[in-house]
Image (cartoon, helix red, strand yellow):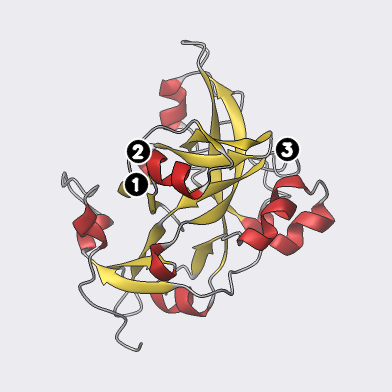
Amino acid sequence: MCYHSSHPGSSTLKKNYPQKKVLYQAPEIFHVNGFARPFLPALLNNNTDAIVPARWKLLPYWIKNEEDAKKSANTLNAVGEKIFETSSYKSYILKNRGLLYVNGFFEPHASDGKKNDEAFYIFKSQHEIFTLGIVYADWTDQETGETYPTFSILTTPANPLLKKIHNTAKRMPLIIPPSKHDEWLHTKSKIEIEPLIVPYQGELFSHKVMRAVLSPKGMDTNIPEVQDKIGKLEDS
């Protein structure tokens, strides 16, 4: 599943998407763990003119406050094949979809095929920005009155590259290519949305990175070096 990612900062987003109003205000993130529930740059279909901060981990309306949010079910990822039936998502997927801007994502690898003991960074050519498909819900903290969007990243079965890398779970995040952005954001029926929830078949690159990215144990992993290549797949 996709729990670790990297993201462009506001200045890069403004440069690459001048037609969008960038309301997300944060520097580049070299690595973030979804369990920290960070705010990340997203484009939501309720306003496709703006890139906004959205918080990782979808929270339904019945979650009352931050303390409840911490204890609620893990909704960092949503299994794409089941999203129309899963109670956490079926009321949102038809209307509330968006794009998450990423520089790349990290996945574990089991060198013996059984236990995850390595980490890999997956990215596009020239380290260009790309987008993951998300489902979101606006959530209000009933103690503070603050309202903001919360989201889950959809996942699909792994493509050939990710089958080799994420070789235990064999899953990958849903990547929405630019040619499918409008469809993903604006279609309104299950019959139109389902064909978009498929493994990505475009080109991706990868290399092995420091294992600490997946279990930092107090180490600050939001540093450029976390993406440095230290090896490659043995059979690549």
Whether residue 4 is visible: yes
- Look at mark 1 in the image and give the residue it sits on: 33
Q: Quadrant of the C terminus?
A: bottom left
Residue 126 is situated, as x and y percent measured from the top left of the image, at 39, 68
Which residue is pictured at 57% across the width and 39% down the height?
Answer: 20
Which residue is pictured at 37% across the width and 73% down the height?
Answer: 206
Residue 33 is situated, as x and y percent measured from the top left of the image, at 34, 46
Q: Amino acid at mark 3?
A: Ser
- Look at mark 2 in the image and give the residue it sits on: 36
Which residue is pictured at 59% across the width and 74% down the height?
Answer: 201
Give the spatial CA distance, label 3 vs label 1. Answer: 26 Å
Residue 157 is situated, as x and y percent measured from the top left of the image, at 57, 68
Whether residue 197 is visible: no
Q: Secondary structure at mark 3?
A: loop
Looking at the image, do the residues carrying marks 3 and 1 touch, with CB atoms under 8 Å apart? no
Residue 35 is situated, as x and y percent measured from the top left of the image, at 37, 42
The numbered mark, 2 or 3, whose residue comes first in the sequence reads 2
The numbered mark, 3 or 1, whose residue comes first in the sequence reads 1
Q: Amino acid at mark 2?
A: Ala
Looking at the image, do the residues carrying marks 1 and 2 touch, with CB atoms under 8 Å apart? yes
In the figure, residue 128 lies in which quadrant? Answer: bottom left
- Look at mark 3 in the image and give the residue it sits on: 91
